[in-house]
Image: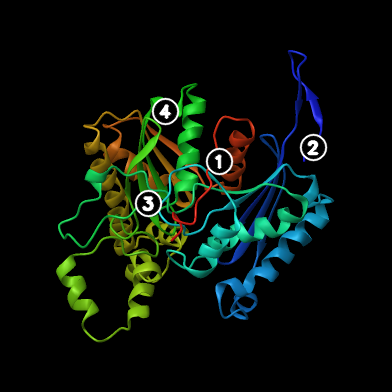
Amino acid sequence: MQLELKETDSGKVLHMNRILAINPGSTSTKVGIYEEELLVFQRTVTHSEGEISQFPELFDQMDFRCAVVKKVLEKTGITPETVTAIAARGGLLPPVKAGAYLVTPVMMDYLRNRPQLIHASNLGAEIAYRLGAPYNIPCYVYDPVTVDEMLPVYKITGLAEFERRALGHNLNMRAMAYRYAREQQMSYSDLTLIVAHLGAGITLTLHDKGRMIDMINDEEGPFSPERTGGLPAGMLIDFALSGKHTHTELHKILKTGGGLKSHLGTKDAREVEKRIEAGDEKAKLVYEAMALAVARWIGVLAVDVKGEVDAIILTGGIAYSKYLTSLIRDHVSFLAPVVIYEGEDELNALAGGILRVLRGEEEAYILSEDELK
């Protein structure tokens, strides 16, 4: 449903678009309301461990999460039937192209019953659909974690049974690439950019002429505040077969027990920097090693395009750290200008992507049953 009319400078009357953006995280639900590009309301509802732990399975949270969004909307006086479209964080779909995907019953069934991995973002599509379907409001996901535009040559590994996977913070990284293009008054499709998302996990992408042709995921790349990143294969085999850890425990170590957490006992980069300021030499060594690892992988992506890079973008929560970003910049600025876009405004990225769809600048895809098998 269109919101209201506005008159442009040329006298042409256009419909205003109101977009509801929803981002379910493991311990929070973020809700934003946008009128065209303007953010008019944003709320982050934090969920305690007790609230989440009462639900044995992820999708047991569905009624709870929907009620949270409805309660937030009630406080704003905005109801779902007054929005033009709903944009939700995409879940662990099969490998897909970048862009918008219409939420359908087939997509929801996949995310509920056979996703690539269990993650809170799998809830997003169904939350949106439950809110929008009664009013025939179109619902979309945008740039899900599983966007895969990698060129085949970059997927090959040294073992035929293994193929490199495109899993990362695509929503934020692609949004920052678009932001850079907009600020430079250029087209995203005319640029070659390396984007590094620095957060609890660290992933990097190479954007070449409108396509993310290569990616370094958090299983193979730099270690981060809580992820191990790539590890020496032989040592990892011995560690896994030592009998000291179960399959589940090993995955937990790799995803939440590595990096700064493993070396320093904390995953809070701010705490690490405080220790460095107090003279902790071990903290300084590990933190600099993490920064250097990011820089090395930026170099790897630069090799793909023979060093022809227009800009290197550092984004994500840890990009607020001038200390860390300056360490990375010092090692890679010879390749291209380094731009810092702190934070990860995923609600804005969702709304911006769907706004392009509503304006006819992008076309939304519909995943078929065959694509979701």
Q: Which residue is mark 1?
A: 364
Residue placed at 36% from the left, 47% from the top? 204
Callout 2 amino acid: Leu
Q: Which residue is mark 2?
A: 3
**Distance CA(mark 4)–CA(mark 3):** 21 Å
Left or right of 133 in this view: 267: left
Q: Earlier in the sequence, mark 4 or mark 3?
A: 4
Looking at the picture, the colour scheme in use is: rainbow
Q: Earlier in the sequence, mark 4 or mark 2?
A: 2
Q: Earlier in the sequence, mark 2 or mark 1?
A: 2
Q: Secondary structure at mark 1?
A: loop
Callout 3 amino acid: Thr
**Distance CA(mark 4)–CA(mark 2):** 31 Å
Of residues 265 and 50, the one nearer the viewer is 50
**Distance CA(mark 2)–CA(mark 1):** 21 Å
Residue 213 point in image, percent of width and height: 32, 40
Q: Which residue is mark 3?
A: 203
Q: Earlier in the sequence, mark 1 or mark 3?
A: 3
Q: Which residue is mark 4?
A: 189
**Distance CA(mark 2)–CA(mark 3):** 38 Å
Q: Secondary structure at mark 2?
A: loop
Q: Secondary structure at mark 3?
A: strand
- Mark 4 and 1 residues: CB-CB less than 8 Å, in contact? no
Callout 4 amino acid: Ser
